[in-house]
């Protein structure tokens, strides 16, 4: 693709779509048939946790990956006479089921990932875990609503994520529902984010080597970012090689995100970050900065960025500009 790509305009357009969808879907009138107001109060806490804040990187990755696979293969990827055979050998694309709406499939997947991310932050901030008081520039959910309400809000957001992926209407086929639910569940569970958080809690005050630190963050942070990319790919259809390239891209930016997070924890202030700066050092948690030093950690983030771009270059996909731009955002961000 030779046309100029405006990442800011692309992000702004999709952020508006995601915000509008979240505002609609995280607004169930839970108390409509009940005399008790507690379910409606719970929805207030859920909306507080999700709306009006956050970078929305994960939903943007879903939408960018979907657009990449929807763009098809590069016209010069293979000689025309070889292309059909090669596509078949690497895994022929599935056709969309009758009634499926690809853009809506991707938007639902994008919002589902964000709900899982939001629930994880609500629980991560609670006194039994990181005990933080600031998130996205405002008081954390347990500070605002109490620990019990925060716990339930996180639980409800997690459930709502899977409800979004399994609508009654044919907008998402049953086969695609199952595929998306499996990707998200695995990334969020014991083999992903929750497992990484368990390692994180068990590692306070303990030295980790580079491999141990990488394994922890591949689960805690990287798994959901990688799943965002793969869910976007699963919203469309492409070759096996493209999926493998996107998986490698997701792994690289997932780890790069955490490396930069560790850097910002010691170089930025709380007002800029929207969360408590210096928290990892104060809690004696192992980080890339404490292990490598600031200069090496910065260099490692750049190495991971280059790995992400190389993966995209080998995908054979026609248009990966949004994914390239988001990789740059991950390593160049200041909050």
Image (tube, helix red, strand yellow):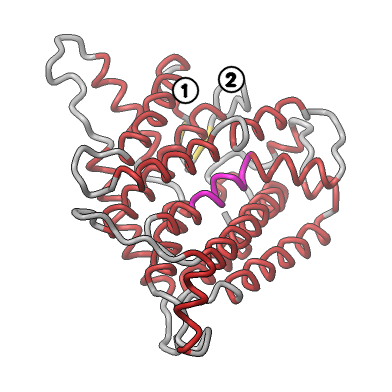
Quarter of the picture holding the N terminus? bottom left
x and y percentages locating residue 136 in the rendered image:
48, 42
Quarter of the image where one finds residue 164: top left
Mark 2 lies on residue: 127
Nearest to the observer: residue 188 or residue 14? 188
Q: Is residue 268 left or right of residue 155?
A: right
Local crowd size for mark 2, using a 10 Å CA cut-off: few (<14), some (14–19), many (≥20): few
Q: Is residue 21 left or right of residue 253?
A: left
Q: Is residue 81 above or below residue 274?
A: below
x and y percentages locating residue 219 in the rendered image:
65, 40
- Name which of mark 2 and mark 1 comes first in the sequence: 2
Nearest to the observer: residue 100 or residue 231? 100
Residue in the picture at 57% in, 54% down: 335
Residue in the picture at 59% in, 31% down: 194
Task: Report the magenta residues as a range.
Answer: 220-228
Secondary structure of residue under mark 1:
helix
Nearest to the observer: residue 197 or residue 311? 311
What separation in Å lies between label 2 and label 1 (alpha carbons)? 8 Å
Residue 142: mark:
1
């Amino acid at each position: 693709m030779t046309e100029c790509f405006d990442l800011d305009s692309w992000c702004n357009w999709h952020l508006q779509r995601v915000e509008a969808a979240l505002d609609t879907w995280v607004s169930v009138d839970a108390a409509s048939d009940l005399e008790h107001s507690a379910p409606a109060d719970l929805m207030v806490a859920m909306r507080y946790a999700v709306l009006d804040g956050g970078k929305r990187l994960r939903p943007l990755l879903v939408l960018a990956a979907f657009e990449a696979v929807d763009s098809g293969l590069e016209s010069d990827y293979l000689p025309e006479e070889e292309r059909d055979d090669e596509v078949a050998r690497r895994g022929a694309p599935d056709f969309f089921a009758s009634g499926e709406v690809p853009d809506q499939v991707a938007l639902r997947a994008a919002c589902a990932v964000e709900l899982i991310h939001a629930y994880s932050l609500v629980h991560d901030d609670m006194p039994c875990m990181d005990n933080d008081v600031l998130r996205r520039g405002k008081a954390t959910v347990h500070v605002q609503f109490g620990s019990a309400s925060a716990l339930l809000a996180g639980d409800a957001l997690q459930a709502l994520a899977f409800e979004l992926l399994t609508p009654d209407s044919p907008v998402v086929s049953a086969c695609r529902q199952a595929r998306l639910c499996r990707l998200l569940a695995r990334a969020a569970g014991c083999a992903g984010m929750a497992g990484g958080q368990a390692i994180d809690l068990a590692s306070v005050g303990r030295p980790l080597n580079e491999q141990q630190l990488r394994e922890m963050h591949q689960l805690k942070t990287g798994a959901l970012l990688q799943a965002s990319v793969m869910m976007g790919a699963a919203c469309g259809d492409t070759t096996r090689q493209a999926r493998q390239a996107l998986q490698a891209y997701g792994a690289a930016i997932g780890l790069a995100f955490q490396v930069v997070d560790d850097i910002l924890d010691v170089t930025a202030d709380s007002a800029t970050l929207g969360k408590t700066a210096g928290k990892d050092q104060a809690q004696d948690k192992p980080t890339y900065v404490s292990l490598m030093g600031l200069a090496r950690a910065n260099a490692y983030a750049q190495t991971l960025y280059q790995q992400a771009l190389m993966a995209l270059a080998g995908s054979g996909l026609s248009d990966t500009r949004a994914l390239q731009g988001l990789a740059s955002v991950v390593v160049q961000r200041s909050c």
